[in-house]
Amino acid sequence: MHSWLVSTRGPDNQGPPQITYILQCSRRFVTLTHGRRTKTSARVHKPGLVHAATFLGAQSRCELVPVREYWHAGYIGQVGMAEVADLNRDGVKEIYLGGVSNAYAQATLVVLDPRDFAGGSVEERSEYQFLHLPPGKEMARILFPKGCIARKFNTLYNTVLAVRTLPDGLLFAEVAERPNSPTECVHYRFGPDLRLHSTMLTDSLRWSHADFYARAQLDHALSAQEEAAFGEIRFVPPAGIVPGTPPR
């Protein structure tokens, strides 16, 4: 997976870059420009890797010459899974990228500051660690827990399907328990400080759980405790940050 984050500066080429659109490449580029999509041909970057890398480059004057890179072990920021917004109202639009962490085999949300993101994601498992790259610089990395359906049926990972801002100023993330069952989801809402506001299971996920239980494929009914467990998200501490430190 190969992505470019494209931005422009003002007429004097001063100040922080202003994000205008994202270019995403899997088999071809998909350009997101003010909500519209156009396509042009491109080559796949390093196809077949177990840990697919996502590349991000903040550009100047919309030229595809990267000035900043961030590599992540697992795909992030595909169409519908990326948002650019100034949720914390500091005057700079943050970059919110949903997808999968291959190292943790879980759905993830990566948040970057366009002024200083860099490096490669730091992983606990050495086989997924990027070599010859400085430690990744992120605002936050969030992991979403798997539920019993994903664990019971040996789903390799849950995955983020959508990331977007809401009219009330919160960030919305939709996480599917199984990639091949995109309606079995948990909806998350985050505040500007990335503190979790709420979780909600979709009716489809509730129905699937009840159906598996009725057919003795699960040994328990859905409980309030199990629902609450979906809210046990994990912040992966950036390099040099003590675990438990709130994201900035």
Image (cartoon, helix red, strand yellow):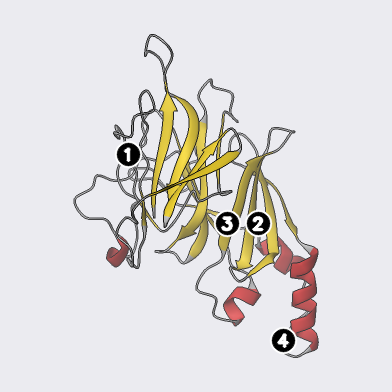
Quick one: label 1, few (<14), some, or many (20+) residues within 10 Å? many
Farthest residue in the top direction?
12
Label 2 residue SS: loop
**Residue beneath label 2, please?**
231
The amino acid beneath tag 3 is Val
**Residue beneath label 3, please?**
160
Quote the CA–CA distance across marks 2 and 3: 15 Å
**Residue beneath label 1, please?**
118
Which mark is in front, 2 or 1? Answer: 1
In the image, is 27 to the left or to the right of 166? left
The amino acid beneath tag 1 is Ala
Query: In which quarter of the view is residue 199 placed?
Result: bottom right
The amino acid beneath tag 2 is Gly
Label 1 residue SS: loop
Nearer-N-terminus badge (2/3): 3
Query: In which quarter of the view is residue 37 placed?
Result: top right
Residue 219, x across and y down, in percent: 72, 86
Image quarter of the N terminus = bottom left
Nearer-N-terminus badge (2/4): 4
Above or below, 56 against 26 in this view is above
For the point 80% across and 65% down, the residue is 203
Residue 128, x across and y down, in percent: 31, 63
**Residue beneath label 4, please?**
219
The amino acid beneath tag 4 is Asp
Quote the CA–CA distance across marks 2 and 4: 22 Å
- Whether residue 69 is visible, yes or no, is yes
